[in-house]
Image (tube, rainbow, N blue to C red):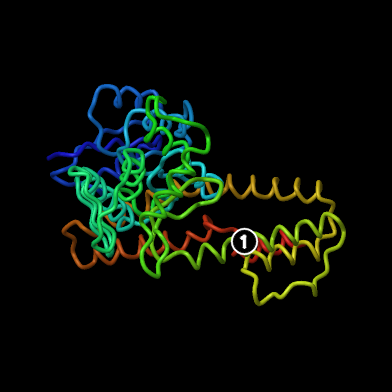
Amino acid sequence: MEKTILVVEDDRGLNQGVAMALKNPMYRFLSAYTLKEAIEYWKDNQIDMVILDINLPDGSGYGFLESVRKESQIPVIMLTANDMEIDEVRGIEMGADDYITKPFSLMVLRARVERLFARAGRQEGKEFQEEGYRFSFDRQEFAVEGKPVVLSKTEQKLLRMLVTRPGQTLTREILNEGIWQEGSDYIDENALSVTVARLRKKLKLSGEECPIRTVYGIGYVWERGKEDEHIEDRRTLKRLDEMLTDAIEGRFEEGKYDETELSRLESRWKQYLTTSKLSVEAARRERTDIKSILSDISHQTKTPLSNIILYSELLKEQPLTPEGLEIADQLGGQAKKLEFLTPGDWSRCPGWRAIFWK
């Protein structure tokens, strides 16, 4: 069955390049260059996936994502030059399934699209089976380590939303809307937490915690084998909070903390607290100005660089002479050398580190 992919990207070269990169007899592409065009395509067509840029000439892609999520749970990939962590978190909180920053490789784009379509196909099924678990939502039969368990309607809805999106964090808002759509069964703001607690107890395996993990401040995710990582994350956050409190109250002492137990983020934060000679307000203004400049440089560079890389990879898939193939390789290789201008983490750049810690 043919799948319709809506590509919302204001840069025409990149928009058309994405369609060429994903060319497949099973895919039909609709290209929208503005938010207005995207809304019109959405109303008039049955869309199966959206590849969405955030910065559009007539509005923000976040608003379109919000509109899509009110009507559908189709896969949405955010394709953008915004590589700040806060932008990615916001996209995930609003229901995006994936987040790809420019520039990106052809293989990554294809793999993400195929993975999301495969996952969407599994979501249409009625069965779920994983080591220790067997769930039949159609027959309402649920087993943990071969033993049947009884789940309420609310618990079934919650479980289905989580297991059909493994590894994807679902916000409390999305879960609440999915479980209590009409509000008739909704009890109070603690209803979701209570339901999660009951479900965890029923799904606990011998010697292993329930795969329903809490993503603090956001929601929940079905993910196995991550408990130690989450415990360490909570320990790190607690230590960071202690360090920040001591710094604010003027009690911070470098020797008080065992650096071997802290993450890289903790070490960088400690270095900032102990070496910064600027006031809090001055430091905040300086960081904001620098980030704004770097973000603007990065944003203006990413789209044309993405085009060069994408089209060079497409060119190599065409029938070329050996000389033509070598030229295509050189073109792509030289373009990738420019990726240092658009790093996902500016703190890894020597120049940025020198300015930031000055």
Q: Is residue 231 left or right of residue 304?
A: right
User: Looking at the image, which residue is at 71% across and 75% down?
Assistant: 258
Image location (x, y in percent) of residue 166? 34, 53
Q: Is residue 212 left or right of residue 285?
A: left
Q: What is the quadrant of the C terminus in the image?
A: bottom right
- Quarter-wise, where is residue 14 in the image? top left
User: Looking at the image, which residue is at 59% across and 64% down?
Assistant: 348
Q: Amino acid at mark 1?
A: Ser
Task: Determine if residue 266 is in view.
Answer: yes
User: Looking at the image, which residue is at 19% across and 56% down?
Assistant: 318
Compared with 318, 232 (above or below) is: below
Q: 10 Å neighbourhood of mark 1: few (<14), some, or many (≥20)?
A: some
Image location (x, y in percent) of residue 315? 25, 55
User: Looking at the image, which residue is at 59% across and 58% down?
Assistant: 346
Image location (x, y in percent) of residue 68? 36, 31
Question: Which residue in the structure is indicated by mark 1?
Answer: 347
Which residue occupies the foreground of this view, 21 or 40? 40
Compared with 178, 134 (above or below) is: below
Which residue occupies the foreground of this view, 158 or 145? 145
Task: Determine if residue 300 is in view.
Answer: no
Image location (x, y in percent) of residue 176? 43, 35
Q: Is residue 254 left or right of residue 7?
A: right
